[in-house]
Image: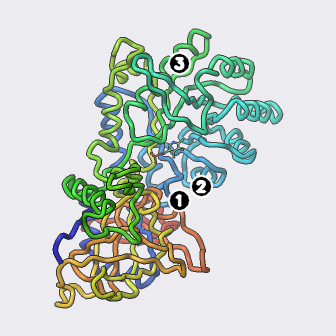
Amino acid sequence: MSGALYLEPRVSPRVSSLLGSSGFLHTLADALGSPLGLVLPDQIGENVERFRSVYSKHHLSGRTFLAHKANRSSALLRRLVTTGAGVDVASLGELQHALGCGFAPALIMATGPKDPEFLWLAARTGVTVSLDSAVELDQLAALVRAQRLPRVRVLLRLSGFESAGVKMLTRRSRFGAPIRELDAVLKTVERYGDAVELTGVAYHLDTTSPAEKAVALEGCLVALEECRTRGLAPRAVDIGGGFGVNYLAHATQWEQYTTELANAVLGSRPPLTWGGHGYGLREDGGTLRGTLGLYPAYRPVAGERYLDDLLSRPALAFSGRKLATLLLEHLYDLYAEPGRALLDQCGLTLAKVVETRDTGAGPLWVRLAATADDIGLEEHGVLMDPVLLPRAPGVADHDTGPVAAHLFGSLCLESDLITRRIVFLPNRPAPGDLMAFVNTAAYCMDFHATHAQRQPVARKVAAWQDGDGEWRWCLDEQYWPITPPGGQQ
Ligand SMILES: *Cc1c(COP(=O)(O)O)cnc(C)c1O
């Protein structure tokens, strides 16, 4: 077939080596079932170092905290603790997990909305609490006083920032106290001086826009000044997460794909999706309307480069001086809470091909032993091709040339599509082959996993290379970062 539109994933050397060990991956999937999640603990170590290098470049002190919610893995957390990075927990279960993985309370940040139990364990163990609201501050102070606990370190999460110059408002958020209420909240903080110690201010914006984040960071710097004039002594700015990941290998493929998707919606080329789905785009009297609701999968400035870019931006309220310079001059600690970016290349999901069905002129139907919830890429709007791992590499049958395919999940549900788009594969898959969906560690591995239809959720294993470069593995919960890794050879 002609006109294949590929979206080849970007893969790190480590992931590339793993994909090259097809026999190893088939053995794992045969033993542990499909779908199967693999996490790569050593990769998170490398990712932490990348973030650290940006801190060094700008001479900044502080810490990165992994946003735990992006993946439930124990192996990743236990490997992370050895790097000196921290963890951001958003539930009682995540806090218990972090403590059990060896994180000292000083390396744990409790964020998000908090149940009384979560707040209690946070206060008891002395982790830092990133306050979501004034109400939460009341609850925490009451708890600390009633149980005569030591003062709890708190960050004040803020929202609703406004820029100084050109009018720009940061997006509305459910979380954090509106900056215009800062004065009232600080009065409360002062009133609770015996129960809480304000150590910093925070924001987290669910946006890809660096300009918006710069406005928020600048707003936090202004808020810190306000705190200091009142005699409070917070030192940290927590800039949350949202540094992003570059999922695709080639800019041109992404540009070509999105162009052709628009053409398909307009009807000027054959469809590219199941049922004419437009990913937010629609045709209206020959015109393209709507907005593309997809993750910008090709994103060269992501992860630590995004952080670098943000820190290098000018702060309008401070005569255009660089944000990093302002942080450095005040000796503020910079906290960051990347989820997606710290998990870049840290995991992949394997799914077995169960059936292939020819449907005449249309794309091949391929059914996988996995549900759309097991492979959350589509849910998160990340379009990226799977890597086909033939069961019997080299068999002539596999050298078919490109095919277009619909990838269906295993649920008895029309909407269980692994991806709504037609996927182009370099070769025709066969039952027994594996499809590897790479870069699923953040939000796309276990975030949506359910027991629908009593199907088991994916097992998870940790994989690493030994001194000879051989791939080793153990169940995720069996992984401890002791020598030898996994502690079981
Ligand atoms: C989800 C979340 C993060 C992580 O966001 P990413 O986009 O995965 O980097 C960080 N901080 C808070 C408070 C969050 O809720």
**Distance (Cα) linking label 2 and label 1:** 9 Å
The N terminus: image quadrant: bottom left
CB within 8 Å, label 3 to label 2: no
In the displayed orientation, state which residue is furthest to the right.
146
From mark 3 to mark 2, how far is it between C-alphas? 32 Å
Residue 155 coordinates in the image, percent (x, y): 59, 30
Going by the numbered disc 2, the residue's amino acid type is His
Q: What residue is shown at x 51% (from left), y 37% (from top)? A: 204
Residue nearer the viewer, 302 or 372: 372
Q: Within the image, what quadrant is residue 278 found in? A: bottom left
Q: Residues within 10 Å of mark 1 (few under 14, many from 20)?
A: some
Q: Label 2: which residue?
A: 97
- Res 224 label: 3
Q: Nearer the viewer, mark 3 or mark 2?
A: 3
Q: Are marks 2 and 1 in contact (CB under 8 Å)?
A: yes
Q: Which label is found at residue 249?
A: none
Q: Which residue is mark 1?
A: 72
